[in-house]
Image: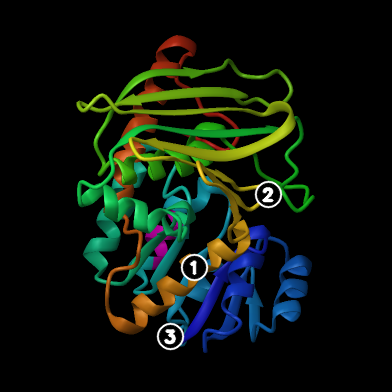
Amino acid sequence: MNICMVGYGMMGVWHSDALQDEGCTLHTVVGRREEATEVFAKRYGYRRWTVDLDEALADPEIDVVIVATPSETHAEYGIRSVEAGKHTLLEIPIAMTLEESERVAAAAEKSGVTFGLCHPMRLRSERGPMRDRIAAGEEAIRHIQGRFFIHRLSNVGATGYQRSWTDNILWHHFTHFLDLGLWLLDFQGELAYSFLGPVHEKTGIPMECILAVETQANQTLLVSGSYHARERVYDSLVITDRDSYRVDILNNRLYTGDGSVGILPEKDNLALVTKDFIAAVRDGREPAVTGRSVLPAMRILDAAQRRWDTQFGARSLPGRQL
């Protein structure tokens, strides 16, 4: 199976590492800058490199495309890839608007290729058994909370790399928690409250966000975060009628009423997504996260964005062009 990696940032690195023992051929890497693309190709043993996505998509030898580029390119690249007949794994988020998200999901279904999304929080080994217990009526969720706090007045990624693009707290980081919560709640829930701060004078983007979701069963999902925080906090908390489960993603620990245990680092957990997708292509089955399954989260993000648009005026922002 020949792989084409689109993007050479942190996610391109993590996916390439995950593919090392999967029996795949690292065939082509597509990048934005020639020198950096060539360096990445040599580092990971890709057979060739290019800065022309169309050239790669036209190559009949390529079976699978992994899109690990800036968020605002996901919809375009995802659609181009599936329409070229390539099995496609797309990094989170699927798109930066609800309309684009629906177009990507529809294009993937129409193409008939295997299409999946990188939503690693769903694949954590701690989550599957919990979801099974909930579905069996053995445990009931009361409250879910996700927190993402970092200091980001300049766009430097987690590896220290100076990005050429601007992140979006609502459509990127909150997508992780919102999708996890809705998945655990069997995709039930409506937006009850949202706050998205004004545009920051230096970064050009909103820097704080809060989302609150409620279900008809009186369950709540709260996501909060800020790019102004001096302390890094990245965790999720699920409270049920049986126990509480806090995943500290930065320190690789799961805390319950019985204490704490070590869990997979974020990079290793992301590898589960990559490996599942390759297995799905080989087995002719759906991957763990399909395009259609992420749309409930995108609808709630869209509702929050529309409220902000009403207050501040709909406009293009760095990282989210309308």
Q: Which numbered disc, 1 or 2, marks the residue that appears first in the sequence?
A: 2
Q: Position of residue 290 (x, y in %)?
A: 32, 59
Say what amino acid the circle numbered 2 marks.
Asn
Label 1, secondary structure: give it. Answer: helix
When the figure is inspected, residue 288 is found, relative to residue 60, above or below; the finding is above
Q: Which residue is mark 2?
A: 251
Kindly identify the residue that appears in the image at 43 percent across and 46 percent down: 95
- Label 1 vs label 3, nearer the camera: 1
Question: x and y percent of residue 13 in the render?
Answer: 66, 67
Visual colour scheme: rainbow
Span of residues in magenta: 76-81
Find numbered disc 2 in the image and state the secondary structure of the residue it sits on: loop
What label sits on residue 60 in the rendered view?
A: 3
Question: Label 1: few (<14), some or many (≥20) within 10 Å?
Answer: some
Mark 2 or 3, nearer chain start: 3
**In the image, is residue 15 part of the stretch drawn in magenta?**
no
Q: Is residue 80 one of those drawn in magenta? A: yes
- Tell me the kind of residue under disc 1: Leu
Q: CA distance from mark 2 to mark 3?
A: 43 Å
Q: Is residue 68 left or right of residue 306?
A: right
Determine whether, in the image, residue 171 is placed left or right of residue 318: left
